[in-house]
Image (tube, rainbow, N blue to C red):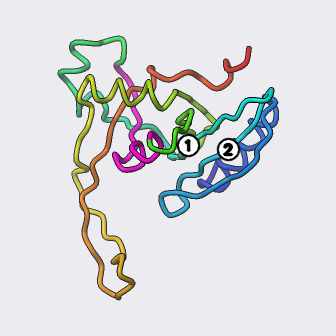
Amino acid sequence: MVLLNHEAAFLFFQKELSLKGFKTLKVSQECKGRHKVFYCEKGGQLVSFWVKFDKDWFHSFNYQFPAFITQFPQYAGFGESINVEYLEKAIRWNISFLVVINQYEDIYIITVKRLEEFVKEHKLYRFQDRTFNYKSKDFTSHKVAETEQTYSFPIKLLTNWKYIGE
């Protein structure tokens, strides 16, 4: 099955949570609805997941970070990224895990703390090479151009969801 959009991905992940014994207590939206935070309970413990969907992985990861790949060739391959502001928010909110899902139902997971340590240690941040236009925050009709700063990371750093709980 191919997940056509983020809403399909979030529904798919919610079913996956249930299959692994997590009870979803609350779901909130972030990033204009493109990310969701799932607050769950399993075995009496509260666990939270910051979930983002991208149709495909970041194919130019090796090209964007050649010095890192030269030093750590075991991480060569696809990557993923998250805006700096959203990772920082996940840290402030004590979110347990970052989850990334692609259109092919591939789900990967990492603790937010481990991700933060890794991207900062290896300086895996960049400014997007294009500018995004967003509506002004003051609700006027003009738009504000913002160049987003992102943290990028290799998919090989993450754990495949299918191995969680086994």
Report the amino acid beneath label 1.
Answer: Trp
Residue 88 falls within the magenta-colored stretch:
yes
Identified at 60% across, 33% down, the residue is 106
**Mark number, residue 154:** none
- Farthest bottom residue? 141
Q: Which span is picked out in magenta? A: 76-91
Name which of mark 1 and mark 2 comes first in the sequence.
2
Residue drawn at the location 67% of the way across and 20% of the way down: 164
Q: Is residue 164 above or below residue 1?
A: above
Few, some or many residues within 10 Å of mark 2 (<14, 14–19, 20+): some
User: Callout 1 environment at 10 Å: few (<14), some (14 to 19), or many (20+)?
Assistant: many
In percent of width and height, residue 139 lies at: 39, 84
Rendered image quadrant of residue 62 = top left
**Residue 165 relative to residue 155: left or right:** right
Residue named by callout 2 = 39
| C-alpha gap between disc 1 and disc 2 | 9 Å
The quarter holding residue 138 reads bottom left
Where is residue 79 shown, x and y percent of the image? 39, 31
Instruction: Tell me the quarter of the image containing the N terminus.
Output: top right
Foreground residue among 19 and 86:
86
- Amino acid at dot 2: Tyr
Relative height, residue 106 to residue 6 (above, below): above
Q: Pointer 1: what residue?
A: 50
Relative image position of residue 147 (x, y in whole percent): 24, 58
Q: Which sits in the foreground, 15 or 8?
A: 15
From this view, report whether residue 108 is shown above or below residue 68.
below
